[in-house]
Amino acid sequence: MLVLGIETSCDETSVAVLDGDGRVLSNVVSSQLAVHAPYGGVVPEIAARAHLENLPVTFERALAEANTTVPEIDLVAATAGPGLIGALLVGLSAGKALAFARGVPLVPVNHLEGHLFSAFLRCRAAALPVDLPFHGLVVSGGHAELVRVEPDRIVPIARTRDDAPGEAFDKVARRAGLGYPGGPVVDRIAARGEGGRYPLPVGRTGDGSNDFSFSGLKTAMLREFQKRGITGDPLDPESLAPDLVDLLASFQRAIVTALLDRVETVHRSVGIRMLALSGGVAANSELRRTLSEWGEARRVRVLLPERAFTTDNAAMIAFAGLLHYRKNGAQEPAVAVARSRWPLGTS
Ligand code: KG4
Ligand code: ZN
């Protein structure tokens, strides 16, 4: 069995081919970073047009790398939400057309569910069977979600009330003149800084819930920049003042601490059997190290995604589609709709 995955929810155009055991045969990602970089963030209309331009060649390459052709595809999985509606429509419409023309099933996939199961993916190794139940922490440019994945449902536990952690990395880096996206550059800078130097606020919501909040931290950082006369003019990441290096390391430490704190709270109250990390921010070195050490200390298995499957990719969409198909069968291609909002755990 071969599954074709299509992802176009934000600024990566991606197509992947997996076999029936979830083995990744190809995963081609065409990034739009360069076209959005001058604007300091993703411009929805530009993203939709770029998907239209990039999808055909991304599709051809994914089939070629998997050494297959369209008639061999048995199942199509396409991201249907959440995301930018114009961007989603490009990939979902292509998926529908393909499924309809070939007479194969289509599975509309929740992008967050794609991230959630991405920690199980391995290049050229089977991802099935998925070991349930587990807790999943999805941290990306648009989301921070802690959920419990059970055989028949996904139970939300905590989410962000304001900024997502990746969004905080991106906004802070932009205001420091370090470009977009902010996560990777701050990650590199923080590696040579002293993360314990500046205690920064990582708020709880104050109402006893486990939800995250990162906007207070972002505001505190903007205030620190103001104090230092940093206005957003481009800075060279390799030659920053030592004080700024420590400040950025402390900022990263604050985000990692907030995430770890919530994981620990949930572990104490209900017990975590296995924790699967995912999303773009799952590429962060300090977060990976900290959660691994936490898992060793608590004897909890911590599953880290391969870096290729952290940021948006179609392999994770194909895999989530495959899991759905094995459980529920396929939906009629014509009824799949794109949705800008689609909370995890809802159908
Ligand atoms: O999952 P993703 O590709 O897109 C969304 O669904 O949002 O995540 C992109 C986010 C960006 O905010 C980017 O700054 C962040 O992931 N990111 C990182 C790192 N690499 C990417 N954040 C922290 N450390 C990294 N190494
Ligand atoms: Zn994503």
Image (spheres, rainbow, N blue to C red):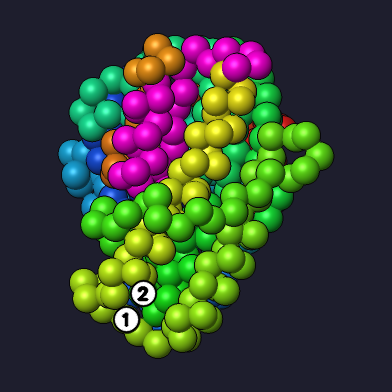
Can residue 141 be seen at all in this image of the molecule? no
316 vs 111, left or right, is left
Q: Is 97 in front, or is 13?
A: 13
Q: Residue 258, position in %: x, y?
A: 55, 42
Residue 318 shown in magenta: no
Dots 2 and 1: beta carbons under 8 Å?
Answer: yes
Q: Is 139 in front, or is 151?
A: 139
332 vs 254, left or right, is right
Which residue type carries mark 1? Answer: Leu
Q: What stretch of residues is rendered in magenta?
A: 268-295
The quarter of the picture where residue 342 lies is top right
Can residue 296 be seen at all in this image of the molecule? yes
Residue depicted at 55% across the width and 28% down the height: 263
Q: Which mark is residue 178?
A: 2
Q: Most prominent secondary structure in the magenta stretch?
A: helix
Q: Is mark 2 within 8 Å of ligand 1?
A: no
Residues at marks 2 and 1, CA–CA distance in whole angstroms = 6 Å
Q: Quadrant of the N terminus?
A: top left
Q: Residue 137, position in %: x, y?
A: 52, 34
Residue depicted at 26% across the width and 78% down the height: 236
Which residue matches tag 1?
Answer: 235
Element type where label 1 sits in the image: loop
Q: Which mark is residue 279?
A: none
Residue 274 shown in magenta: yes
Residue depicted at 19% across the width and 44% down the height: 65
Q: Is residue 122 above or below residue 296?
A: below
Q: Is 83 in front, or is 293?
A: 293
Q: Within 10 Å of the Cα at label 1, are there few (<14), some (14-19), or many (20+) other Cα atoms? A: few
